[in-house]
């Protein structure tokens, strides 16, 4: 007997359907309902959970085995693409690694125990996610878009986007007088310069950032990223992101997400200018400098404003100065565009939203099943189709016997 696990209570084909429904749906209850409606399968939510969690644990174990095998390779071997890496030419292509974190609630060992009022507890934990992506782009002799796109100078476009970024707060009013005709106009599209997405693979874990870096390094090795001439590493200002870059991707160009930079510029402008129209005038000037790679001019302005404030420096103004100072070397956006590199992390942001639909919710509290389900979410999103390979390999290796009963 082959193709069916000894622990299985249904066929491999049904198991695939259960795992797909349990990962794409928002809960195991939803998965049970979808299986009944779409596949005429009467499978309880508890059974969906057991089967999905078992498969998820298998994938986590495979992931760790793959990582250990990579880390046992000699250093010269790690610096070459493996034989099974995609054989596509890297001409006009960029290899990029994007890092960010999401949100999900995890129970801990003190779950259910009474706690004193002063013992504030947050069950929210951070699933760490990395996108390993290939882009199609060409380098240029000069900056292809030296002038700021109109949308980045329009408060009606910029403000809603920067306010979505974690930690950014502000008033709801538009900080300048914008006529109805101006606010409704369609911005002229600049010539296309941004890299075009080709293939995305995803790794994710609830373990520390160092573990995410090791997993991302393994995935980059198997994708053959070492052969790419142009490589980029993108993230926000989180120090852990750049720690991963320094330890595992030191030959990748470090790039801070443009919209995160703009969010701190907007905060600094609001804190330093009470008049709303003057605020946006200052903000437009700073955005222009950053777009052209002249972030040092913004830093010099902020230093002057901080000195003028004396001992009563607004917290957000000081924080923006610190952020821009620490990340100035990663904000050479004119050079990145010239090299054909991506300058935003919108791809990883959308990936985290996809994962969050399954993992995040005020009513969801995960236990040890969080890591297996997160792994399956990453597998489902990955365009390298790791689950298809897993199912094919899994069926070919099954004997129908439990290991404890197999012949020696």
Image (cartoon, rainbow, N blue to C red):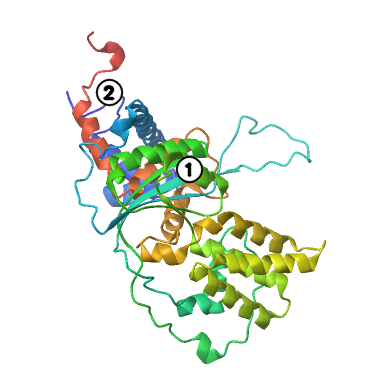
Q: Nearer the viewer, residue 136 or 62?
A: 136
Q: Nearer the viewer, residue 129 or 238?
A: 238
Against 70, residue 45 (above or below) is below
Provide residue 183's location: percent of width, then percent of height.
Answer: 52, 85
Q: Considering the image in quadrants, where does the C terminus appear?
A: top left
Mark 2 Cα-neighbour bin, 10 Å: few <14, some 14–19, many ≥20: some
Residue position for label 2: 6
The reply, left or right, for residue 21 in relation to residue 235 is left
Residue position for label 1: 246
Q: Nearer the viewer, residue 254 or 216?
A: 254
- Residue sitting at the far right: 311
- Residue sitting at the far top: 408
**Which comes before the other along the chain, label 1 or label 2?**
2
Provide residue 402's location: percent of width, then percent of height.
Answer: 28, 17
Provide residue 351's location: percent of width, then percent of height.
Answer: 42, 54
Location of residue 160 (image quadrant):
bottom right
Q: Residue at x 61, y 58 (%)?
A: 325
Alpha carbons under labels 1 and 2: distance apart: 45 Å
Which of the two discs, 1 and 2, sits closer to the camera?
A: 1
Mark 1 Cα-neighbour bin, 10 Å: few <14, some 14–19, many ≥20: few
Q: Residue at x 34, y 44 (%)?
A: 379
Q: Considering the image in quadrants, where does the N terminus appear?
A: top left
Circle 1 SS class: helix
- Residue 307 shows which numbered tag? none
Q: Nearer the viewer, residue 182 or 220?
A: 220
Q: Residue at x 78, y 40 (%)?
A: 117
For the residues bearing labels 1 and 2, Cβ distance under 8 angstroms: no
Against 60, residue 287 (above or below) is below
Circle 2 SS class: loop
Against 372, residue 33 (above or below) is below
Q: In the rendered image, is residue 35 in sight?
A: yes
């Amino acid at each position: 007997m082959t193709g069916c696990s000894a622990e299985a209570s249904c066929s491999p084909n049904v198991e695939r359907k259960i795992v797909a429904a349990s990962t794409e749906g928002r809960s195991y209850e939803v998965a049970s309902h979808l299986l009944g409606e779409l596949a005429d399968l009467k499978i309880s939510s508890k059974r969906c959970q057991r089967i999905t969690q078992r498969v998820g644990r298998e994938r986590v174990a495979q992931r760790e085995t793959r990582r250990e095998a990579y880390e046992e390779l000699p250093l010269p071997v790690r610096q070459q693409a493996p034989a099974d890496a995609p054989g596509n030419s890297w001409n006009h292509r960029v290899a990029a690694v994007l890092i960010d974190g999401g949100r999900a609630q995890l129970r801990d060992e003190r779950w259910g125990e009474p706690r004193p009022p002063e013992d504030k507890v947050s069950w929210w934990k951070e699933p760490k996610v990395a996108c390993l992506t290939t882009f199609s782009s060409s380098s240029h002799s000069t900056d292809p878009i030296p002038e700021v796109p109109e949308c980045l100078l329009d408060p009606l476009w910029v403000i809603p986007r920067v306010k979505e970024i974690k930690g950014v707060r502000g008033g709801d009013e538009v900080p300048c007088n914008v006529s109805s005709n101006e606010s409704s106009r369609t911005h002229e599209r600049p010539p296309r310069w941004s890299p075009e997405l080709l293939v995305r693979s995803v790794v994710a874990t609830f373990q520390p950032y160092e573990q995410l870096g090791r997993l991302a390094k393994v995935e980059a090795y198997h994708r053959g990223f070492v052969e790419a001439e142009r490589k980029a590493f993108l993230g926000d200002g989180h120090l852990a992101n750049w720690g991963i870059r320094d330890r595992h991707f030191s030959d990748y160009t470090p790039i801070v997400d443009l919209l995160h930079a703009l969010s701190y510029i907007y905060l600094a402008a609001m804190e330093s200018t009470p008049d709303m129209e003057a605020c946006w005038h200052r903000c437009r000037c700073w955005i222009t400098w950053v777009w052209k790679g002249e972030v040092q001019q913004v830093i010099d302005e902020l230093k002057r404003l901080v000195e003028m404030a004396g001992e009563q420096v607004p917290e957000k103004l000081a924080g923006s100065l610190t952020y821009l100072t620490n990340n100035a070397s990663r904000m050479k956006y004119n050079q990145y565009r010239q090299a054909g590199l991506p300058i935003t992390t919108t791809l990883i942001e959308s990936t985290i939203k996809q994962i969050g639909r399954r993992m995040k919710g005020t009513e969801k509290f995960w236990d040890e099943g969080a890591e297996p389900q997160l792994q399956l979410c990453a597998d489902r999103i990955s365009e390298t189709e790791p689950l298809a390979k897993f199912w094919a390999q899994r069926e070919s290796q099954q004997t129908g016997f439990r290991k404890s009963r197999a012949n020696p």
